[in-house]
Image (spheres, rainbow, N blue to C red):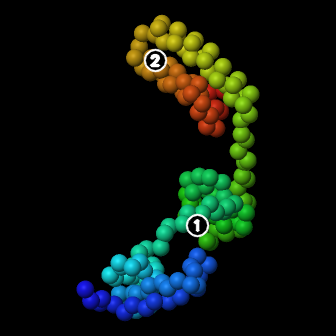
Amino acid sequence: MENKYAIEYRKGSKWNESPDCLYKFMECKECGAFEKVCEDTTAVTCYECVNEMCDPPEIKTKRNSGKPSGWHFMKIFVDKDGNVYFKGVQQPKLKGTIPPTEIKKKKRLSKKEKQKYIQEAAVKVASLKKELKGLRWKKDKKIVEQKIKNYMKVMNGKFTESLVSKLFS
Ligand SMILES: [Zn+2]
């Protein structure tokens, strides 16, 4: 079988190659650059051409924007430089006209606090269930059932800020 592409044998030069061995190189079928190949390779595309054919990998980095999570959902958010955003859309004309939005540090619950909330939630669920039995109307039942659901979430370890403040304040 005749090779369609030029082949060269080169002495090893890289850290993972032996200088005493010959390595087979073949020209890239796209650009002609020599690329190291296996003995039975019949055609090769060099890494540069591969890169050109594929989209670059999407690299997601966590950027610290200095903005709180969910800032783009806020009706008005003003960053520390005075940039004003209405629901995440910058309002260049308003820059500097509104004081920066105060960013509240999220407070994390300690294990003890969580434990306390779970206990309280269990007590609440028990009493709400009793209350539910005495209810006659569907719409009243629905309200209590929703409450039970929310307390159950806490019992299952869900401690979002909104949930906790709604249930325990
Ligand atoms: Zn190439």
Q: Nearer the viewer, residue 65 or 95?
A: 65
Q: Residue at x 42, y 9 (%)?
A: 136
Please name the amino acid that badge 2 sits on: Asp
Would you name the residue on which mark 2 appears? 140
Q: Nearer the viewer, residue 125 or 135?
A: 125
Left or right of residue 97: residue 19 = left
Left or right of residue 144: residue 70 = right
Q: Is residue 144 above or below residue 109?
A: above
Q: CA distance from mark 2 to mark 1?
A: 44 Å
Q: Residues within 10 Å of mark 2 (few under 14, many from 20)?
A: few
Direction front: furthest residue: 20
Q: Is residue 54 above or below residue 128?
A: below
Q: Residue at x 68, y 29 (%)?
A: 114
Would you name the residue on which mark 1 appears? 90
Find residue 11 and report its horizontal and vertical position in percent: 53, 88
Please name the amino acid that badge 1 sits on: Gln
Q: Quadrant of residue 12?
A: bottom right
Q: Is residue 96 above or below residue 126?
A: below
Q: Residue at x 64, y 63 (%)?
A: 63
Quick one: quadrant of the N terminus? bottom left
Find residue 19 and report its horizontal and vertical position in percent: 58, 85
Find residue 65 and report its horizontal and vertical position in percent: 66, 62
Q: Quadrant of residue 13?
A: bottom right
Local SS, label 2: helix
Q: Residues within 10 Å of mark 1 (few under 14, many from 20)?
A: some
